[in-house]
Amino acid sequence: MKKEFRVQAQRLRLLRKESGLNLRELSKKVGISKSALSSYERGERDLTINMVKRLADFYNEDVEWIIGENEHRRLKKISS
C-alpha cells in the first residue's frame, strides 16, 4: 500500500472512531455503502475527490489533512 493511501485510511478510521459512529451509521449519514467505507479505511480503495470532499464536510476537517498533505487538523466539533 502506498504511503499516502495508508495515511488516508488511518485518518478516515480515526475520524470515524472520534465521532463515535460505526461503519453502518456513517454510511447512512454520508450516503455511501458500508463496504465502500470499509474499503477506504483499509486502504483497499482509492478515494475520489468528491468522496474526500463529502467526508471532509461531514467531519468539518480539511481535505488536505485527510489526504495527508497537511499535518494540522481543524479540531472542531464533529457533525453527528
Image (cartoon, rainbow, N blue to C red):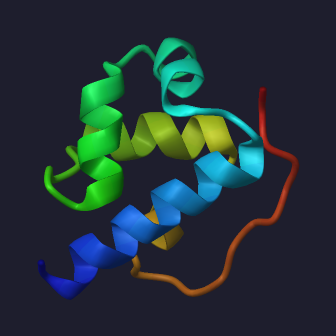
Residue 67 visible here:
no
Q: Residue at x 25, y 32 (%)?
A: 36
Q: Split into 4 quadrants, where in the image is the C terminus?
A: top right
Residue 26 coordinates in the image, percent (x, y): 55, 26
Q: How many marks?
A: 0
* Position of residue 24 in the picture relative to residue 20 (left or right): left
Task: For residue 26, say whether it is visible.
Answer: yes
**Residue drawn where x is 66% and y is 51% of the image:** 17
Q: Position of residue 38 (x, y in %)?
A: 33, 41
**Left or right of 71 in this view: 72:** right
Q: Residue furthest right?
A: 77
Q: Tell me what residue is drawn at x 54 percent, y 46 percent.
A: 56
Residue 51 placement (x, y as % from top left) = 33, 37
Q: Quadrant of the N terminus?
A: bottom left
* Depicted 62 relative to depicted 39: above or below: below
What residue do we see at 23% from left, 45% from top?
39
The answer to whether residue 57 is above or below residue 62 is above
Which residue is at the front of the view, 1 or 59? Answer: 1
Left or right placement of residue 72 versus residue 76 in this view: left
The x, y position of residue 16, in whole percent, is 61, 46
